[in-house]
C-alpha cells in the first residue's frame, strides 16, 4: 500500500531542489504576482483521481499551485499581520509531520521540548523565566483557552453548573474580534463585552475602565476578566499594562494580555518600555507565526502555572495514562490530538539564538519609523498624530486639492491588488480609509519601503483626478 512509483531518495532530492528554489524566490520581491494559469485551473477542477499521478508529477503540480498563490513570506507583503516562513520552521514542520507525534499524552522528549519552548518564549518577552505554556493552532484558540481558565477561577463549578451570574469582560474599542468570539463561544454572550474608550494613543482609558467595573459591581455584574491588547491589529497600540494590572489586583479580575501580534516586541530594547506590567498578567497569548517569524500554525498561551488549565480541562479518562505529577497535554487544552507545533519555535531559537530574533523585530520597528517619517515629511501623504508604537503605520495618500481622501485611498488599495508589485491592506480609522503597511517580515528592507511609496504614488497620481 502507498508504495512510491519511483523511490524515496529521488523524491527527496527533487524536493530539496524545489524547496531551495522556493526559499531563494522569497529573498527578493517579484515584479508582480502571477495569474493562475489555465493549466492550474484545469488541474484544480478535476474530479477525484482513481489512480495516482505519481510522486514527481504531484510534487511539481503542488509547487506550481502554491507559487500562484498569495504568499505572506514575500518581502513586499505589507498587509494584515503576516508570517514570514522562517526556513528552520519549515524544516521543523517537515520533521514534525514525518514523525507525526501526538502530544495529547506524554510523548517523552517531545513533551519536554514543548515545555522548554514555552519557557524560552516566556523568557524572551520578560513574562516569567519558568512560564508554563501550550501551543495551539492560533490566537483565537489561545484566547479562548485563557478566558476559559478565567471562568474556572471565578466560578469553580462552572464546568458542571454553568455560569448563572451576569459577567463582564473588558477590552479596548480596538481589541481583536477573536476575543469577542471567545466570549460568545464560552456562553457569556457578546453583551458581556465592555468596549472601553481609547485615548489619543489609541490605548484603553484607565479612568473609563475602572468606572465600568464600578458600574458593573453596583448592578450585580461580576467583573470576570480584562483583555489587554499588546499590539492592536488596527494601529499596533499597546494598552497600559502596568496600570491595568493595578486595577485587576484591586478588584480581583483575571488579567489576560492578547499579545498575538505585538508581545514579541517586549523582547527588544527598543520597545520593552511599552510592555511594563506584562509580567503581572495571569495569561498571555502570542502567535509565534506572526512576529516570531515561524510558519503557521503556531500560537501559544502562557501562564505561570498549569493549575487554572487543569481545573478547566482535565478529565480522568480511563484510556489516558497519568504516569507522573505533570498533567497530560490533553488535560490542559481544548485539543486532544495535537502535533508538535513547538518544534518550529524551538528549532528557530536553537539555530539562530534570541539575539537574532530581537534584531529582526527591531529592524521591523525601524522600518515602521522610516515609513512614518517619509510620509510625515512628504507633501502628498498624511499620518496619524502619534508615531507608531510597534510596526503598523497607517498612511494616507493626500495630494494637493484632494476632496475625498478616503475614496482615493480605497481605490489605490483596489488597484494595488490588481497591480501586484506590492500587497497592502486598508484600515478604517475614525471613519476614514487609510493604507496600512505592517512590518513583520525579516526579509523586508528599506528598499521595499521605497517601493511601497513608489507604487502608491504611481497609482495615486493616476487616480487622484477622480477625487479632487
Image (cartoon, helix red, strand yellow):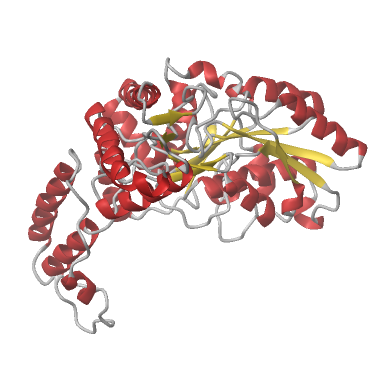
Residue drawn at point x = 27 percent, y = 49 percent: 95
Pick the front one: 379 or 447: 379
Pick the front one: 460 or 351: 460
Q: Quadrant of residue 217?
A: top right
Residue drawn at point x = 19 percent, y = 57 percent: 34
Pick the front one: 353 or 274: 274
- Tell whether 6 sits left or right of 313: left
Picture coordinates of residue 395, whole percent (x, y): 42, 34
Picture coordinates of residue 367, whole percent (x, y): 33, 26
Pick the front one: 58 or 1: 58
Visible in this render: residue 76? no
- The quarter in which the C terminus is drawn is top left
- Tell whether 116 sits left or right of 277: left
Picture coordinates of residue 103, whole percent (x, y): 45, 50
Visible in this render: residue 398? yes
- Tell whether 343 sits left or right of 52: right
- The quarter in which the N terminus is drawn is bottom left
- Tell whether 307 sits left or right of 6: right
Image position of 127 with respect to 170: above or below: above
Image position of 462 with respect to 365: above or below: below
Picture coordinates of residue 57, whole percent (x, y): 12, 69
Image position of 189 with respect to 172: above or below: below
Image position of 84 with respect to 273: above or below: below
Total labels: the figure holds 0
Residue drawn at point x = 66 percent, y = 56 percent: 185
Amino acid at each position: 500500500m502507498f508504495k512510491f512509483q519511483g523511490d524515496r531518495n529521488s523524491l527527496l532530492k527533487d524536493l530539496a531542489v524545489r524547496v531551495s528554489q522556493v526559499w531563494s524566490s522569497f529573498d527578493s520581491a517579484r515584479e508582480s504576482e502571477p495569474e493562475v494559469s489555465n493549466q492550474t485551473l484545469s488541474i484544480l477542477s478535476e474530479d477525484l483521481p482513481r489512480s495516482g499521478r505519481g510522486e514527481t508529477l504531484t510534487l511539481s503540480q503542488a509547487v506550481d499551485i502554491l507559487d500562484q498563490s498569495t504568499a505572506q513570506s514575500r518581502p513586499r507583503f505589507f498587509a494584515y499581520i503576516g508570517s514570514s516562513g522562517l526556513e528552520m520552521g519549515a524544516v521543523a514542520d517537515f520533521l514534525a509531520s514525518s514523525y507525526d507525534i501526538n502530544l495529547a499524552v506524554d510523548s517523552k522528549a517531545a513533551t519536554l521540548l514543548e515545555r522548554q519552548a514555552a519557557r524560552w518564549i516566556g523568557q524572551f518577552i520578560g513574562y516569567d523565566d519558568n512560564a508554563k505554556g501550550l501551543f495551539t493552532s492560533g490566537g483565537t484558540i489561545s484566547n479562548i483557552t485563557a478566558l476559559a481558565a478565567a471562568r474556572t477561577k471565578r466560578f469553580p463549578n462552572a464546568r458542571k453548573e454553568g455560569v448563572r451570574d451576569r459577567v463582564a469582560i473588558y477590552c479596548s474599542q480596538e481589541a481583536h474580534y477573536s476575543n469577542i468570539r471567545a466570549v460568545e463561544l464560552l456562553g457569556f454572550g457578546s453583551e458581556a463585552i465592555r468596549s472601553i474608550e481609547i485615548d489619543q494613543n489609541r490605548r484603553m482609558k484607565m479612568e473609563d475602565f475602572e468606572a465600568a467595573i464600578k458600574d458593573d459591581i453596583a448592578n450585580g455584574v461580576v467583573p470576570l476578566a480584562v483583555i489587554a491588547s499588546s499590539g492592536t491589529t488596527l494601529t499596533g497600540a499597546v494598552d497600559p499594562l502596568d496600570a491595568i494590572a493595578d486595577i485587576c489586583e484591586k478588584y480581583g479580575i483575571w488579567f489576560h494580555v492578547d499579545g498575538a501580534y505585538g508581545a514579541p516586541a517586549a523582547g527588544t530594547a527598543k520597545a520593552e518600555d511599552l510592555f511594563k506590567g506584562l509580567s503581572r498578567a495571569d495569561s498571555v497569548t502570542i502567535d509565534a507565526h506572526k512576529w516570531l517569524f515561524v510558519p503557521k500554525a503556531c500560537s501559544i498561551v502562557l501562564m505561570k502555572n498549569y493549575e487554572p488549565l487543569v481545573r478547566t480541562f482535565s478529565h480522568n479518562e480511563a484510556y489516558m495514562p497519568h504516569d507522573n505529577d505533570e498533567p497530560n497535554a490533553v488535560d490542559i487544552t481544548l485539543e486532544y490530538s495535537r502535533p508538535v507545533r513547538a518544534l518550529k519555535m524551538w528549532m528557530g531559537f536553537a539555530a539562530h539564538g534570541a539575539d537574532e530574533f530581537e534584531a529582526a523585530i527591531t529592524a521591523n520597528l525601524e522600518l515602521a519609523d522610516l515609513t512614518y517619517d517619509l510620509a510625515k515629511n512628504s507633501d502628498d501623504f498624511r499620518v496619524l498624530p502619534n508615531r507608531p508604537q510597534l510596526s503598523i503605520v497607517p498612511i494616507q495618500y493626500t495630494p494637493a486639492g484632494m476632496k475625498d481622501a478616503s475614496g482615493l485611498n480605497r481605490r489605490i488599495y483596489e488597484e494595488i491588488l490588481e497591480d501586484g508589485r506590492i500587497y497592502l491592506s486598508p484600515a478604517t480609522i475614525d471613519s476614514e480609509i487609510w493604507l496600512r503597511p505592517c512590518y513583520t517580515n525579516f526579509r523586508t528592507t528599506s528598499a521595499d519601503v521605497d517601493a511601497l511609496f513608489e507604487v502608491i504614488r504611481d497609482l495615486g497620481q493616476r487616480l487622484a483626478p477622480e477625487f479632487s
